[in-house]
Image (cartoon, rainbow, N blue to C red):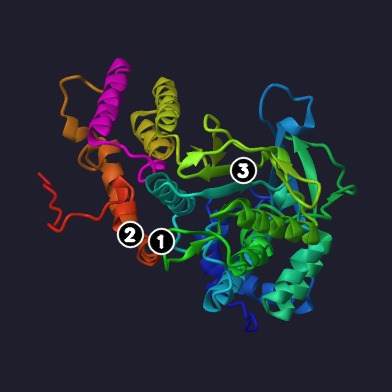
Amino acid sequence: MDPVIITPDDVAEAVRRAPNWKSPGLDGLHHYWLKGFVVCHAVLARQFQEALDQKSLPSLFTTGITHLVPKDRDTIDPSKYRPITCLPTIYKTLTSILSARITRHLNSNQVMSRAQNGCRGGARGTKEPLLIDAVIGKVVKRNRRNLSAAWIDYKKAFDSVPHTWLKRVLELYKVNCTVRDFLGQCMGQWSTILCHLGERMTAAENHIRIRRGIFQGDCLSPIWFCLSLNPLSTLLEGSGRGFQLRRGGTKVTHLFYMDDLKLFASSRSQFVELLNITCDFSNSIGMELGTDKCAVLHVERGRVANSEGIDLSMPINIRTLSEAETYRYLGMSQNIGVDEAGMKQSVCDVFYARLTKVLNSLLSGVNKTHAYNGWVMPVLMYTFGILRWTQTELNALDRKVRTIMTSHRMHHPRSSVMRLYLPRKHGRGFLSALTMHNREVCSLRTSPSWEQFVRESLVQAAWPVALAPPPRRALTVDHQ
């Protein structure tokens, strides 16, 4: 990796990408002010470069505030709290610059595995793994093939990565030595202060040291974590095992989204080999599998086969799914494929519950529109392209939304339906489920990574209905 020289343009770019009013750490500084006071960028660039060259940073910038948010009313059990750590804005700006340089180095040398979709630029997040998984399930059912799959869950993945391995992985992938030494020095200073209901529970001189896991909250942590698990992808892909969609096509050994791992094999013996590789690697770097949250699925000639848990050479036992059981992976209940009927029902229940909550709130009309577009509609949009929504179902969804809005006096029954979905400048600005579905499906069809996967591994007959090739005639839109 080339040496890192921090310029004012780097600071300006890092500040530009950051949200304006995200909660700060001990420095109490919001990014809004750094965006406004451009004259500070040159000073920050010089001080960041000095800290990088001296390989040290004041302890103030490596100390976070961990807010304990209760998950439910049972506030006695510590496991019922969700910790959210707020880091100093200055530290997040510096790590954002370093993250951009490290990502550029990884991309130029094609270091990150294609199976890892967590921190890959230009990817569509969890949708691509779910689409590949849906195609595999469709091929297995249609062609009556054998498949062994496993959902692997790490126990406290982000909090259990050893610091020694985090340092080692930077060295393995040739990250600049100055950056490695600087991050190693900062890692030794990582600490946090507990805060509950707005009150600090830790004295200023008794910070809780972070001796294991990544420092969550900055821009560098996600890519660093993915990098720590990247050797596992290399081992799995180099094993020569996996599930082959067609003869001569690419073998799919696994899917990764951050720490969510799914293994594929065409036979049980190959599957045990992949699972042994995963367990050996996890034990070598000091991470544990949460066996209570892992599951195995065996399919023989297109049907789920009931069998006992897999017994490996090491003390680990994973439950095997039956035909009636499902596993929730990346938000979708799965067996051989996605349980579409159950997922549609659960998604619609959440969608209508959120819609009712927004309409019952005391927000103004424009803010209710923003809440619907930014909080209610994404529940449905996540499933577009993965679940097979028919045009009739989408029209019924839009119709029921208008009915609920009418009952809450937000939409007159005789008012123009078209005006409801026009942009705010000319109409009311609500998003239509039908329009957003068609737009998302067309976008997925032209996704570069998806097209490459289809070209390498699939035949047209295996495509899901929602992702069938678009018609040859051009799409026309009536703007009237």
- Sort mark 3 into few (<14), some (14-19) or many (20+) by Cα contacts within 10 Å: many
Disc 2, disc 1: CB below 8 Å?
yes
Image side of residue 20 versus residue 420, left or right = right
Residue 344 x %, y % = 40, 31
Q: Nearer the viewer, residue 209 or 77?
A: 77
Q: Main secondary structure of the magenta part?
A: helix
Identify the magenta region: 381-410
- Sort mark 2 into few (<14), some (14-19) or many (20+) by Cα contacts within 10 Å: few
- Name which of mark 3 and mark 2 comes first in the sequence: 3
Q: CA distance from mark 1 to mark 3?
A: 23 Å
Is 9 rendered above or below residue 406? below
Say which amino acid is labelled 1.
Answer: Arg
The residue identified by callout 1 is: 246
Q: Secondary structure at mark 3?
A: strand
Say which amino acid is labelled 3.
Answer: Val
Q: CA distance from mark 3 to mark 2?
A: 27 Å
> Residue drawn at (74%, 61%), measured in percent from left and top?
281
Residue 178 appears in view: yes
The residue identified by callout 2 is: 459
Q: CA distance from mark 2 to mark 1?
A: 8 Å
- Name which of mark 2 and mark 1 comes first in the sequence: 1
